Image: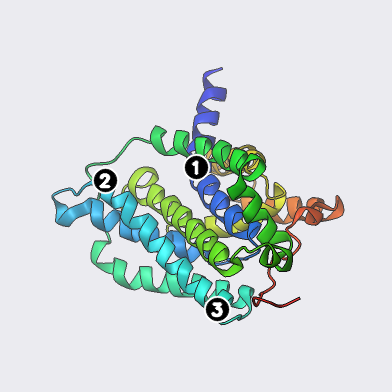
Amino acid sequence: MNEILDALLRALAFGTPLLLASLGAIVNERAGVVNLGVEGMMALGALAGFAVAYGGGTGGNLWLAVLAAMLVGALAALLHAFVTITMRANQFVSGLSLTLLGLGLAGLLGKAFEGFPLFNQPPQWPFTAGAIALALLLALVLQYTRTGLTLRSVGENPAAADVLGLNVGAVRYAAVAVGGALAGLAGAYLSLVYRPSWTDGMTGGLGWIAVALVIFVGWNPLRAIFGAVFFGLLYYLQFRLQGHSPIPTEFFSAMPYLLVIVVLGIAGLRGQQGAAPEALGRPYTRGER
């Protein structure tokens, strides 16, 4: 029983950043915007959060650190929004560029913080409980509120939303900013809670798994909770089984990413892609039909 409880707690610890990042992706994709820059925004958020929390070694304000991470993530996302919504560039290319930019910039600026531990580490439970509560809230907002209806309308049929007087561009800008803020928060969790330090490459592909998780759960915030815990359990097993099996350790390191490919393949065979917003990935110009 103790081992099961320990595995669940570890799965929640691993799954929290995945849940936060995937919820952010659900918000902007429900509005019709794909952002593959999650990994880069997480890296920037992790660096910003640690830099503020570290406070020159004296210990900074943890709440400000969280806000800084969310702000940096939102600003990075707004760059993607400008390129794709205003300039109508390809969303996939822009997102990939944002990942490369975010990882490179975080790696460069983060050299000054390499090797310094964080002594004022916050507890895990507020982040985990907050992520679960946020998933529940997002599900309610999407299903039962005018805000959720607006978001879904813009993602499904922006032309019809335009006719009804909705500002499609403004809604998409706001959704992308929220998505970036949550990705930044996911990064802050890594550098403040999970590994209270800054290390280049500490996101370790979690942003890509979060993007895949959105597809796997069919853009459903409630399913994202279970999906994040599931992948969190895989991460736990990856470390738990190393050294206790004749299987090479490289296999366990690749296991979460291999399973991403498997579950996406299964989702495709089951027609899960049909749950995607109708206008996902397509730019829109006001007045266009």
**Nearer the camera: disc 1 or disc 3:** 3
Tell me where residue 99 appears, x and y as whole percent: 50, 70
Residue that numbered label 2 is attached to: 62
Instruction: Tell me the tag on residue 16.
Output: 1
> What separation in Å lies between label 3 and label 2 (alpha carbons)?
35 Å
Mark 2 residue type: Leu
Q: Quadrant of residue 250?
A: bottom right
Tell me where residue 253 appears, x and y as whole percent: 57, 52
> What separation in Å lies between label 1 and label 3 (alpha carbons)?
33 Å
| Residue 199 visible somewhere in the drawing | no
Left or right placement of residue 160 versus residue 208 in this view: right
Q: Earlier in the sequence, mark 1 or mark 3?
A: 1
Circle 1 SS class: helix
Looking at the rendered image, the quarter that the C terminus falls into is bottom right
Which of the pair 125/116 is nearer the observer? 125
Residue that numbered label 3 is attached to: 86
Mark 3 residue type: Thr
Residue drawn at x 63%, y 73% is: 92
> What separation in Å lies between label 2 and label 1 (alpha carbons)?
18 Å
Circle 2 SS class: helix
Tell me where residue 128 appears, x and y as whole percent: 46, 36
